[in-house]
Image (cartoon, grey):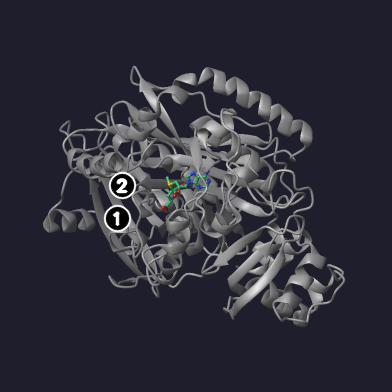
Amino acid sequence: MRLLTHNMLSSNIKGVTKGFPLKIEVEKVVEKQVEINHDFLRNIFPKIDWKAFSDAARTMGYVELPEQAPDPSVLESDLDFLTKFHHALLELHLEEGALVCPETGRKFPVNKGIPNMLLHEDEV
Amino acid sequence: MWYLCVFYHRLLDYRIPEFESLADLFGAFGDKRSSDFNTQDKVLQWRLPKHHHPDSPFHFVHLPYEDVARKIANRSILVKGIYELWGEGNDFEELEEAVKSYPDERKLPYLEYESTFKITVDSFGKVLSLQEQNERIQGLSYIPFKGRVNLKNPDHNFWLMETDENETNNGLPPVVKRRIFFGREIGVADRKLIPMYQLKTRNYLGPTAMDAEMAFLMANQAQAAPGKLVYDPFVGTGSILVSAAHFGAMTMGADIDIRVVRDGRGPDCNVWSNFKQYGLPMPIGLLRADNNLPPWRPGLKEVFDGIICDPPYGVRAGGRKSGGRKLLKGIVSPYTVPDDKRADHIPSTAAYTLVECVHDLLDLAARMLIMGGRLVFFYPVLREDGSVETHFPEHPCFKLVATSEQMLSSRYSRVLLTMVKTSLYTEELALAARIKHLEFRENHLKWLENGNLHSSVFSPADAESGDSKVSKESKLKYRGKYV
Ligand SMILES: C[S@@+](CC[C@H](N)C(=O)[O-])C[C@H]1O[C@@H](n2cnc3c(N)ncnc32)[C@H](O)[C@@H]1O
């Protein structure tokens, strides 16, 4: 699971009002190289919840991201930032671990890189 | 300028929508960013050659410039080639007259001394011997070719194409009259893609994997391209996303079935390995999720450029959603899963009806697509009295821009719907959609009642055997939308 996916997901258990961001429990992180596409990064940047993203990167052991969302102008000028943003967003993978609902503590397992977001019948 | 467009004689209903989707992608309707999503109808002008049936492989199309034509031809699956027409006629005398009167300034730049060229003779509906082909080329001596012939890698390709008037069953629409065309090639299709990606050689296959040709058509309808993100909420073995990735899009997929999406048939035979097989970038994300209860965070919207899918209709490949059937009806109270069993517990699911599934899909797409983004999906229909019911699902955020029917049997068809997001998703629109959905459900109770119908429409055996049978039979008699 890449951090882009993490940034999009929340716990949707019935009754939960604050299911985002999911806490990450790390068992195994792998890095997989992805070709950088600047257009894609510019398109996706405004959709990212920055706090959740930079916290998640830190949990995964990557500390190079600013804590505050940078001004979008960096996307035009700052190659160094684009490279780091790309790396954290798309190259860090949670291979094994779990996503934890911040409200209930319910664990959504991540196995072979795939988060299992399906609810149990008493959660829908 | 008008161009001659020659299509493959396949999937007739898909030809013009594919062409127009690609024309839009490559800028034939002006700059994307400045276009008004609501008012502009992105349709091209088309004409048919004299005496030709709309199902004819030959069409004339108006495009703003040659570069768009070349890009469309190179990427299209159903365009055989696009040509600058130098002349046409019912016989060779008429053709000669037409070519001679075509303006010199359009012809001479392609006939120069330093250039190389090749002439190809192509016939539709009959086979020409090598000798007949050579005679036809000799017959073009009135064109002042000054360059050298180069059969391998010429600068300019010319085509002499003729359709036959014979009335026999040659697979073409019966009303076609003999017509001869001569033109300069602008671009031709790369059909090599289809054998390269054919399912027969696909590493990880499921019973409802989408065949390569159709998957590419779907990706073209969705205008998949580099820098875009494409989502399939019913990803299965990933066959649709593979085609989107081939065209350079980033991909993401979800499925309710964990065995399909995570486990596959082992470490080297799963959704990931289907991308690796072709050297394509892996999906950005794969997850197990129920499209009836999507796990997207509140407030997340407009992240996907395209959503493409083959939803789970029917019994065999039928949809499931979270929560047992009785539970959802309120007959039983929820079974509380004991804590020690939670990790391995397999949640029970209920049947996911066609109408509900489509409603969820439209709602998801309305929220998650960018403005101008495209939703492309299959919808099953019953053919009554030889015609198709034309009542398709609607949503206030979307404009339906293409419907392409493929007949699977004499009674059932599937229709590929292409919708463009033309309005922002608001609470009011979501509510309006909910009301429309309820009306639609009323009108379609027969679909709900009759689960077997969908399974006959979508059972893979039907689709596949239909396919091979049809391609044999189509040589014998004209089959229209069957091909
Ligand atoms: C027609 S198949 C699509 C197959 C896919 N195109 C492929 O290449 O393999 C439909 C898929 O939807 C999945 N499905 C069924 N109900 C679902 C739901 N409620 N949410 C998400 N996926 C579901 C099934 O597991 C199945 O893989």
Q: Is residue B302 left or right of residue B122?
A: right
Q: Residues within 10 Å of mark 1 (few under 14, many from 20)?
A: few
Q: How many marks?
A: 2
Q: Is residue B42 visible?
A: no
Q: Where is mark 2, residue-wise?
A: B96
Q: The residue marked by circle 1 belongs to what chain?
A: B
Residue B191: quarter of image: bottom left
Circle number at residue B35: none
- The kind of residue tagged 1 is Tyr
- The kind of residue tagged 2 is Glu
* Quarter of the figure that contains the C terminus of chain B: top left
Could you say where residue B33 lies in the image, as x and y percent from the top left? 72, 52
- Above or below: residue B472 compared with residue B411: below
Q: Where is mark 1, residue-wise?
A: B142
Could you say where residue B449 lies in the image, as x and y percent from the top left? 44, 22
Q: Is residue A55 left or right of residue B37?
A: right
For the residue pair A112 and B447, the one nearer the viewer reads as A112
Q: Is residue B153 visible?
A: yes
Residues at circles 2 and 1 in contact by the CB criterion of under 8 Å: yes
